[in-house]
Each structure stands twice: as structure tokens, then as C-alpha cells.
Amino acid sequence: MRQPPIRLLNPIVNWVARLSVSLHTKLLVGFLLVSFLVFVVVGLNLWLLYRVEERALRAAGPAQQVARAGRMEYAVTAQSHFRAMHLLTGDPANDQKLMGARQDFSAHMGYLEGVMDGEGKALLAKLREANIPFQVHGQVVDRLAQAGDLAGALKVHLESEHPASHELEGLARGLVKVAEARWSGSLQEMERERRWGYTLAVVAGGGSLWLALFLGYVLSWPVLGAVGRLEDHLERVSRGDLSKEVQVANGDELQALAARSNVMMHEMARMRAELMEQNQALTTQARKMEDLNRTLEERVRQQTTELQAARRSQDPDQTITTTPRLSGAEAGVHLPGTYRCEACGATGRVSREVHGTIRCPRCQGTRFARVAVETG
């Protein structure tokens, strides 16, 4: 008989087997539990994907702040560069580029003021304060350049506007460092989230797999064990062993099947016992009939011998037996005399006229030849 390979789980297997519910219900519950585990694992994976996506979006914000802060620093440097090129070359295109750099600086600052807080917010306030004298000096340089005093404009630029740009660049670099620190923290948090998600997915997947295997084990072995016991029982019955019942403790259809199998076995045993009794009775009766036949045959032989002896004692000359008289063509007339049997050659004497068939007392033959005539 098949035995569960994990003995530690035998109490659970036996408990599941003894549950008084149908086999269909047990299998349905197992299917629903496994389906629930699949849905849980799928839902957990979707939630982990959502968490990773959310962390990625959070990390994208600090990355955007780093990029905007770096562009602010570039905008300040570009203003000084385009200012010097305009004053040295007088090319109005450089003045247009200067205006574009100012607009970029203002746009980046406005964006960062809306998303940054804490230390970044304080640096932005300093940047806005430092930008005021920088813009004032720039306006002075613009008026002098428009008036045609390029030398005076260059002097104000070198003595006032350019040093102010260095202060702005330093603050912008500090803002870049703050944004990079936040970005690095977001990346580290995202990495921790990723590792935690992988660990949770592995634990949940492994736990679900173990639980699915556990459910399959404790739900299948009650069936396999019962089927194995029924198979062994039927094998014993097929060999003619009708003495041992099968015991199935399942509270389902398999237990009822085992009970019916036991009833069938007892019925077969009863029928076999009856057949054996009938066979024994028939054997005994046949022996009695054989004994009776032998007795009757012996009595017939004895009576025949006695009758022949009696006839011989009554008529010593009659050595040939006769039968009742026949009619028609079968009748024959045997005159007194001596006759020889044509079959065995024995001779006998008929002392009176016989109408009918005569028989040889030795071979029971009926064909004779008369060899002597009885006279007198």
C-alpha cells in the first residue's frame, strides 16, 4: 500500500481525509485556494511595479531640479559672456542672446521656487536677492552701451556686473549640490525599494509555491492512500482471499466505496461457502449412488446366478435358455435334439419342442445348428 513520503504531515493528511465532506468539495476548495494564491501573487507583483514606478517618478523630480539648477548657473555665465561679446564687438545678436539667457534664468528660478523646499528654498531666496544688483548693474551697462559709451559700459561691467555674476554662479552651484544630494537620496531610496520589492516578491512567490505544494500534498494523499488500499483489497479478492476487510477512514465517497467493497467481499464469501457446501453434498450423494449401483449390480448378479442354478436343478437336461414365444416371422420352432452355438461352439440339448428364440448360456448367442435328433 502506498504511504505518504513525509511522515511529519501525516496528521494533517489524516485530518483532511476524515473531514465529512464530499471528495468534490475537497478538490474544489483546493482549486479555489490555489487560484486565490495566484491572484495574490499577481496582485502583489502589480503593486510592486506601481511602487517602483512611483519611486522612479519621485527620483525624476530631483533629477529635474539638478538639471534646472545647472542651467541657472549656465544662464548666469552666458549673460556675462554675451555682455562682454556685445561690448567688444558691438554685434546686436549678442544682445539678443543676452536677453534669452536672462529669460532662461528667470524661468528656471521660478520652476525651482515652486518645487524646492528647505535648504533649496533658502538658496533660491539668496539667489533672488543677489540677482537684484546684478540686474541693476546690467541696466546701467545697457544705458551706457545704448548711449555709445562702450568704454564706460565695459568698465561698469568689469567692476560691478561681472563680480555680481560670480556671486550668482556660486549660489547656483550650491543649489546644484542641494539638488544632487536630494537626487542621490531618491536614488538610494529607490534602490532600497527595489531590493525590498524583490525580497517581498521572492518570499511571496516561494511561500505561494510552498503553500500550493502543501495543499496539493494534503489533498491528494487522502485520495491516493484510499485508492491504494482499495487496489490492494481488490487484488486480495482476485486471489481468493475473502477474509480481510479494507479500512478507509475518509469521510467522503471513498469510504462508502470501501464499505460497498467489503459488503461485496462478504457476499462472495457467503456464496463461495454455499457452493462449497453444495459441492460437498453432491460429492457425498454421488458416492452414495456409486455404492448403491455397486450393491444393485452385485444383487443382480447374485439373483441371476441363483435363477440359473434353480433352472438347472429343475431340468438338468436343459442347457439352453429360452425366451417367450414370438409371433410372426420372428418366431422359430426348435425340435428336441442337440444344438451347437455357432458363436462359441458350445453344445446343449433341447428336450422338448420350443417355440421362440433360444440363447446360449455361455455367450448369449441366438444362432444354433442342430447336430443330433432327439428320439423316443
Image (tube, grey):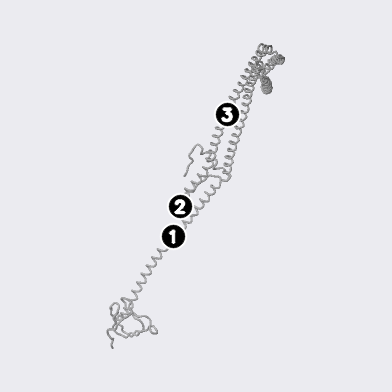
Marks 3/1: CA distance? 84 Å
Report whether 256 appears left or right of 317: right
Pointers 2 and 3 in contact (C-beta within 8 Å): no
Residue 205 rendering spot, x and y as whole percentages: 55, 34
- Taking the image as shown, residue 236 lies to the left or right of residue 34, namely left
Q: Secondary structure at mark 3?
A: helix
Image mark for residue 238 = 2
Q: Disc 1, disc 2: CB below 8 Å?
A: no
Q: Amino acid at mark 3?
A: Arg
Q: Quadrant of the C terminus?
A: bottom left
Residue carrying label 3? 194
Residue 117 seen: no
Q: Position of residue 188 (x, y in %)?
A: 58, 24
**In this figure, what is the number of numbered marks?**
3
Earlier along the polypeptide chain: callout 3 or callout 1?
Answer: 3
Instruction: Tell me: 366 left or right of 184.
Output: left
Residue 67 sits above or below residue 17 on the image: above
Q: Is residue 346 above or below residue 64?
A: below
Closer to the camera in the image, 371 or 231:
231
Labels 3, 1: front one = 3
Residue receiving disc 1: 279
Q: Please rate how many residues cluster around mark 2, counting C-alpha atoms within 10 Å: few if below 14, some from 14 to 19, many from 20.
A: few
Amino acid residing under circle 1: Asn
Q: Secondary structure at mark 2?
A: helix
